[in-house]
Amino acid sequence: MASLARVAEGRALTVPQLRRRTALGKPSGWPDSVHAVLQQVYAARGVLTPDQVEHRLARMLSPQTLGGMAQAIEILIEAIRDDWTIVIAGDYDCDGATGTAVAVRGLRLLGAKRVSYAVPHRFIHGYGLSAALVESMQPTPQLIVTVDNGVASVAGVAAARARGIKVIVTDHHLPGEQLPAADAMVNPNLVYVEKCGHGSPPCDVCAHDARLNKTFPSKALAGVGVMFYLLLALRARMYPSVGADHQNGQRPDLSVLLDLVALGTVADLVPLDFNNRVLIEAGLKRIRSGRGCAGITALIESGKRSIATLCASDLGYVVGPRLNAAGRLEDMRLGIECLLTDDVGQAYRYAEQLSAINMERRDLQASMVAEAELMAAGAAHTDAVGVTLFEPSWHAGVVGLVASKLKDRLHRPVIAFAPASEDNTDELRGSARSISGFHIRDALAAIDARHPGLIERFGGHAMAAGLSLKTSDYPRFAEAFDAIARELIDADQLQAVLHTDGELPVGAASLNLARQLRQAGPWGQAFPEPLFDNAFECQSWKLMGERHLRLQLRDPRDGAMHDAVMFNAYHGTPPPTRLRAVYELTINDWQGREAPRLLLRHIEAI
């Protein structure tokens, strides 16, 4: 098995293997206005005809196909009719914050008058609907609706129901062995079992066990998407015809929530299947037209991005981190309030606070990542396949970002740990990030089965997960994690691979193509932004700040010169004179003048 890449000066010394995508079929039916390069980019992602990128809302999956809706809707109808007190139990990341805002805004639009929210504090309540969070809800609500959490909240749901509170769980995380005893549960990753209506199994009429498995066609909905779907289904039940009377003679317009849905979906890094792309594109169109909520508008402008040309990556790299920072270092209620306010001035004040917290997060992250890189280069870690890192001074709200950075550097699954809080150093909180082919949540489940009691709590997805354990058990866990990684990961999986869309043809790096690529998304997880690789000669370069490069690259095929930038790339060594670059074709719109520019993602000497 390949040895672990040593880390020096913030870089992994191993070079990723470049692998070019191939078309998954022949493009057809595209108008001449669609650039041939874009057609090939689409074909490499399985999109062969124009109808496959018609991201119209009419083509989104029906809310009625999502299991658990009937029970949840009945409870919500009763709650609205009888004016129950409803608490939305959110989460402290961007998906949870946007989902909470969607739930509060949406239920109010549908007639609920007493809707509030509660979001756990990372260091006080822990994750999800915990018993501690339920206890903090004063006065006691009549209904709790979770968003982006709850499928693993067995104890929290039990605590709520013991107090006479009804609970609806809306979540998208993978279920564990035991489900909470909620009154209703909506989750695209659950298999819903329904009786056929002919009686108890075995059924003489159907000649099978009288059960039908109902699964949602897409498993990729984010938590905010699940909540939006529940609201759509609830509205359809309350106002079965478009012309039903309600406020000015029309049913509530839930499309006003799509900017929040787009933000949460992009920020949570869920796969951008067709359905998610429909939701994101609708939200982006709303924002670009100036109809985004005050909070999102303020966050975009705080991040110095253009409302008119906003794209999905702007949501992921600029807006999402500002919201996430509140949940990591402070209290996510600040982020949720930013998304709920309709006061423009207040929204900008919230956005500035969130930006300041995000700057603090970036500084803390940089320090922790530097320490983690030194640890990973040490003898204790150089042969590890499943890498675990722990430093008592680390902040539990930032370890997920550390794990992500180190996973990218080392191309190994990484779990970074920190004390649960300053007052609770006997417990560790860990955040895990994985590589393709190694299902991190299933790996934690396997460790839990082999070493009962070692992990106190865990949950998550294939590529990311969270867990907690006793500080004294960390060495034993580190050994168990490395062992399961060695068992399940093949040697070829340890080679980092960088997929590209091949060489851009001579003369193709134009402003026209750059505009088409930008508008052609939304690009994101499992529908990646186009990357090209070409050979260049570096004619000149200079530093921007301390670590960023600006380069002039010459295409040896025709002598064309290209402006290029590469961020966080300078470590004391100049770029090679002859190089192969992997890059995005982007637009430099400095001072309002647009020009094509290459955003370099990787370079290697040739």
Image (tube, rainbow, N blue to C red):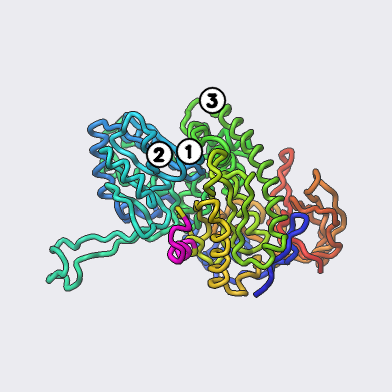
Asked whether, in this view, residue 333 is left or right of residue 538, the answer is left
Element at label 2? helix
The mark that comes first in sequence, 1 or 2, is 1
The mark that comes first in sequence, 3 or 2, is 2
Q: Between residue 218 and residue 332, name the one nearer to us.
A: 332
- Across and down, in percent, residue 582 comes to 71, 62
The answer, for residue 253, to whether it is visible in the render is: no
**Mark 2 neighbour class, 10 Å CA radius: few under 14, some 14 to 19, many 20 or more:** some
Q: Quadrant of the N terminus?
A: bottom right
Q: Are marks 1 and 2 in contact (CB under 8 Å)?
A: yes
- Across and down, in percent, residue 555 comes to 81, 63
Judging by the rendered image, the residue that carries numbered circle 3 is: 346
- Residue in the image at 46% along x and 52% along y: 278
- 268 relative to 217, above or below: above
User: Which amino acid is tagged 3?
Assistant: Gln
Give the mark toward the camera: 1 or 3. Answer: 1
Judging by the rendered image, the residue that carries numbered circle 2 is: 132
Q: Are marks 3 and 2 in contact (CB under 8 Å)?
A: no
Asked whether, in this view, residue 83 is left or right of residue 565, the answer is left
- Residue in the image at 55% along x and 53% along y: 472
Query: Disc 1 and disc 3: Cα gap in Å?
Result: 27 Å
**Mark 1 neighbour class, 10 Å CA radius: few under 14, some 14 to 19, many 20 or more:** few
Query: Disc 1 and disc 2: Cα gap in Å?
Result: 8 Å
Judging by the rendered image, the residue that carries numbered circle 1 is: 124
Quarter of image, res 241: top left
- Residue in the image at 51% along x and 61% along y: 440
User: Which amino acid is tagged 1?
Assistant: Ile
Magenta region includes residue 70: no
Element at label 3? helix
Q: Which residues are magenta?
A: 444-455
Asked whether, in this view, residue 581 is left or right of residue 501, the answer is right
Element at label 1? loop
